Image (spheres, grey):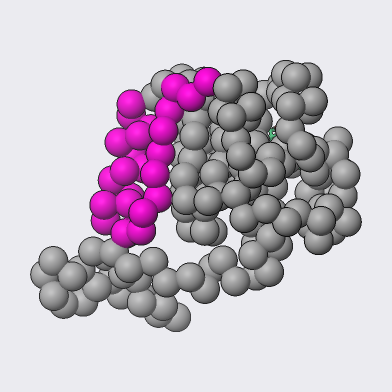
Amino acid sequence: MLVVLRLGHRPSRDQRVTTHVALTARALGADAVWVSTEDESLEKTISGVVERFGGKFNIKTGVNWRNAIKAWKGEVVHLTMYGESLSKALPTIKSKDLMIVVGAEKVPREVYDLAGRNISVGNQPHSEVAALAIFLDRYMRGKSLEKNIRGRLTIVPNPRGKTVIDRSKGKAR
Ligand code: SAM
């Protein structure tokens, strides 16, 4: 089980970035995203993508992050530019049940202590979306993008136009 825990989501300001965190988590092989603030509209957006493009990805908002981290049975990895280096840390992550924590604005000090690992994706400030994508890609040894998620809509790679198969209509459009 691979869960991404998104901290500090402010519905009025972070809607777009948190949507991207969730979509990135789904596209790169996570099973769920848990968001610390309740946001029905975000849930609808992500559930809509799952309904169209498939997979079992799940979103939960209004999650108490402190309890969620404490209750997690596997390893907890907090992505932060201050952490230990990704390449050194990766080979030591053994658990199949992984919680990956990403922040928005300032991450509370307590998170650094509660997380089993604080891991940096380089030591420059960038973005939770970039950090998550690189982490998942490396964690899955570059295989995460090759996973075939079967859904009502399937995109067929096309060097120029757009080819989308809609199974409910049974033909490409
Ligand atoms: N300065 C804030 C702090 O750490 O308290 C973080 C702001 S940053 C825009 C938002 C999130 O992006 C961070 O919480 C972290 O999860 C992620 N992030 C940004 N740069 C990172 C890096 N170099 N390595 C790992 N994660 C990073």
**Rendered residue at 72%/37% (across/down):** 78
Q: Residue at x 44, y 22 (%)?
A: 62
Residue 122 on image: x %, y %:
84, 49
Q: Considering depth in this image, is 94 or 130 the residue closer to the camera?
A: 94
Q: Is residue 28 above or below residue 114?
A: below
- Residue 115: quarter of image: top right
Image position, residue 156 (x, y; %): 36, 77
Instruction: Using residue 24 as the reference point, say whether residue 169 is left or right of it.
Output: left
Q: Is residue 127 visible?
A: no
Q: Is residue 149 above or below residue 121?
A: below
What residue occupies the far left of the structure in this picture? 169
Q: In this image, 79 relative to 146: left or right?
A: right
Residue 160: in magenta span? no
Write down the region rendered in magenta. Answer: 40-64
Relative side of 91 to 94, left or right:
right
Q: Relative to 171, does residue 109 appear above or below in the rendering?
A: above
| Residue 49 part of the magenta-drawn span | yes
Can residue 85 be seen in this snapshot? Answer: yes
Ligand 1 is found in the corner quadrant, namely top right
Q: Nearer the viewer, residue 158 or 75?
A: 75
Residue 51: x percent and y percent?
26, 52
Name the spot of residue 91 as percent of width and height, x first: 81, 61
